[in-house]
Image: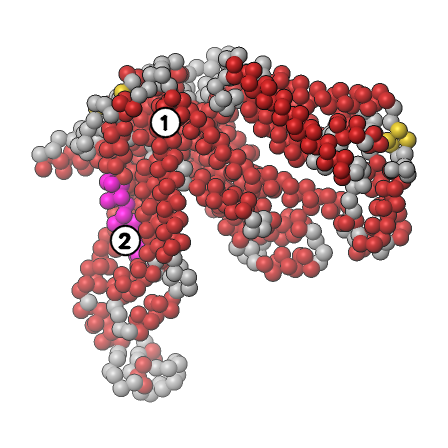
Amino acid sequence: MGEPVARAAVRMTATASLAGGLRRWKPTTPSLRARAVATAVEAILYLAITIVVAIVEFYAAGPFSDFAISNWWIGFVVMAIWQGWHWAGAQTPVGSYVDHYIAETNGAPACFWCVAVRQLTRFGFLYALPVLALSGNVSVILAFWIAAGIATYLTPGHRAPWDLFAGTQLTESLAIERSEALAEITAPADFRLSRQRVAENRRARRIMLIAGMSSVLVSVLIVWNIFSEAWQFVAADEFEWGLLTDIGWFPRRNKFDLATLFVGTLWITGIAILVAGPVGLGVAIYLSEYAKTNVRTIVKPVIETLASIPSVVLGFFAIAFISPDILKPVGSVFGIDFGIFSLLSAGIGVGILSVPIVASIAEDAMRAVPQELREASYGLGARKATTALRVVFPAALSGISAALIVAISRAIGETMVVFIAAGGSGGAIFEANPSEPGQTITAAMASLGAGTDSVAGSGIAFQSLYFLGALLFVITLLLNVFSDAIVRRFRQVY
Amino acid sequence: MTTTTPGSPETPGSSGPSLSTGRVPLSFDSLKRRRSQDSFGQVFQGLLVLSVAIAFAMVLAVIITVVYDSADVLFSRFWEFLNNRSSSDPAKAGVAQGIRGSLIIAAIVSLVAFPIGIGAAIYLEEYASDTPMTRLIEVTVRNLAGVPSIVYGLLGLAVFVQGLRGITGGSSVISAGLTLSILVLPIVIIASGEAIRAVPGSLREGAYGLGATQWEVIRTQVLPAALPGILTGAVLSMARALGEAAPLLVIGAAAFYSTGFQGQLEQMQGAFTALPMNVATFAKLPADVWSSHAAAASVTVMVLVFFVNIVAIVVRARVSKKLGR
């Protein structure tokens, strides 16, 4: 402490670079203790302010008082990430009061006004702007934060821009330049990574980490939003559990009969698997065991074409071809009257959509079975069909069942085909007959969502959208976890 | 043919271990005969071929139905259909707004989802060590890929339409683009991750041996080598984003709207629609008048998706050729 810090830093970095290269170089100001104290104090301060503001907001019953995702919360998350990222290594306002020497430039103390201006601007950016964000128009502030983040990022040592603004470009960066100059003269430069390359490397890693965290962020957002809104549906005054068992699904009249939707979803899923299972597995076995290379080069792209057809188109296909040209003639033979809209027609459409899923996953699983197994089977005199059915198929069973489960999960989540072809509109009476129109979970959500604006004001109908979303999320998540578990449990490692 | 006939004693050892060395009279003909007697095998193979034929028939039926039904519109007023706005008058209705929306959505997806997705894949494959955090990221990516698209619509409704109304302007094409970006993010991550994992380790080790930093290894060796796979994944996810309608329905894509005298920016924040939404809208209207419109819009979507897929194939071929593989 007795020695001017900058000089000490220069001396330390110079020796460090001579001893082991710049990679071991650590910033020397301020002291670790001071930084730890300062960071802790600042975090506590910030949290306290946040909590106070949140409480005020909650009891003032302002426009965002529902604790759902509001501008304030988004601002808070952005702020917290940014602060956590940049602050730990940089100086803090409190820290600069604890260790005044941060504001020294090359040994000479910065002027009092510089320090004061810096602290004021920093407090403004840190604490005043989030409070301003409560006023609702968050876009300007968000844009400013992003700009400030970029500026922070580009400044040496990741200082906040207002540090430079206040004339306190600090000892660290000066020290680095000096040590560079020293190292140029003294060190065998070729064995040393240049500071720029090291910095670039570190920056790249950091950016990739942020990108990697995006999926976690999305998951958290999904779970948080959907379940908080679904909770509001359950916790609403109008809600009672009896509403979930009624004569049908009429959200605008507060009739939320889940059985109606579950029956529809079960029919759609069952029909889809009946269509996609045999066809998809047949294609998979053919492609992996029977097809010669030139046949494969034709069949494979056709299956992929089927995969790339948008689901709306299949919805239209269901009402334009499956219902009038297939179901009607066939139904009239058996004395069943099919209309244009029916669960069966939509189920077949979903089934067509699921064929490529089953085919591609099952084929991958069967091709992964090692050739030795087939050769051993042939060597024992087995026929080709026996080899395919009793050797390859069981060996690939985990992948094949995973394919079927993924197809089921996709069929449950498929929306547009059902929305267009199953004929459910705003509501549906309980109907267990697949030749009649029906409603599924997803189609009910689509009908609710299509009238988003008009639903918004009418009681709890809007929240029922999220309630269904939460159900759907849980069901598909369980199916995915289940298929993962099957693959892991029964996979044969070759 | 005579030289390859098994069982001819003149050519012992001429083509490796010959079948004729054994005492069993195992000839090509006898094998063929056994195959023709295998009735179960033939039925089984017949069933397999039948299932392939059914799959072919499905593809053909979809394409033929759609093209046939669209003839009314596409052959009589092709350019008007592509250039007109949506309208409640069947003689005037077109998909110009849908095409515009879809193209903007594609641009937003490629600007948002591709960099983030590829970056995440690089992090997972190249940087991340096996920590609980890494495993958490991997599990969430895998589960996100299985979440139904309409749930992403709910997310977009809550975050982009209601939360960030100041930026996106509510139910706008910006919200739609961001929602679909999140939707395809896991697909991009998984596809890019597989492409990066396929890059041989020797490439990396060679670059490290020459003194490159990790980022330089990734930038100059791993990414170029994985580029064909990454591009394929990216473009396939783009095709998915272009064909997706359910999330747009939830975040409030409009069936019919007029823009009035708005500037470009205001239009970005205003009402929007996309091609799949056009299809859904037309398909929900009375079929006798609107069926051909739905079919024509379907053709437009499929041509767009097909075009994107072709671009993927061409780009992959060119990049692979440039890399000498």
In the rendered image of this protein, does residue B256 appear above or below residue A9? above
Gap in Å between the C-alphas at discs 2 and 1?
Answer: 38 Å
Q: Which mark identifies residue A282?
A: 2
Residue A315 appears in which quarter of the rendering? top left
The image shows residue A77 at horizontal and vertical percentages of 58, 28
Name the foreground residue: A474 vs B209: A474
Q: Which range of residues does the magenta coloring cover? A: A270-288
Q: Is residue B266 magenta?
A: no
Which of the two discs, 2 and 1, labels the residue nearer the N terminus? 2
For the residue pair A280 and B307, the one nearer the viewer reads as A280
Please tell me the numbered disc located at residue A467.
1
**Residue B18 on image: x %, y %:** 34, 82
Asked if residue B77 shows in the view, the reply is no
How many numbered marks, from 0 up?
Answer: 2
Residue drawn at 13 percent across, 35 percent down: A331
Q: Which residue is located at x 38 percent, y 53 percent?
A: A487
Element type at mark 1: helix
- For this rendering, which residue is in front, A49 or A210? A49
Instruction: Give the residue type at disc 2.
Output: Gly
Tell me if residue A225 can be seen.
Answer: yes
Q: Is residue A283 magenta?
A: yes
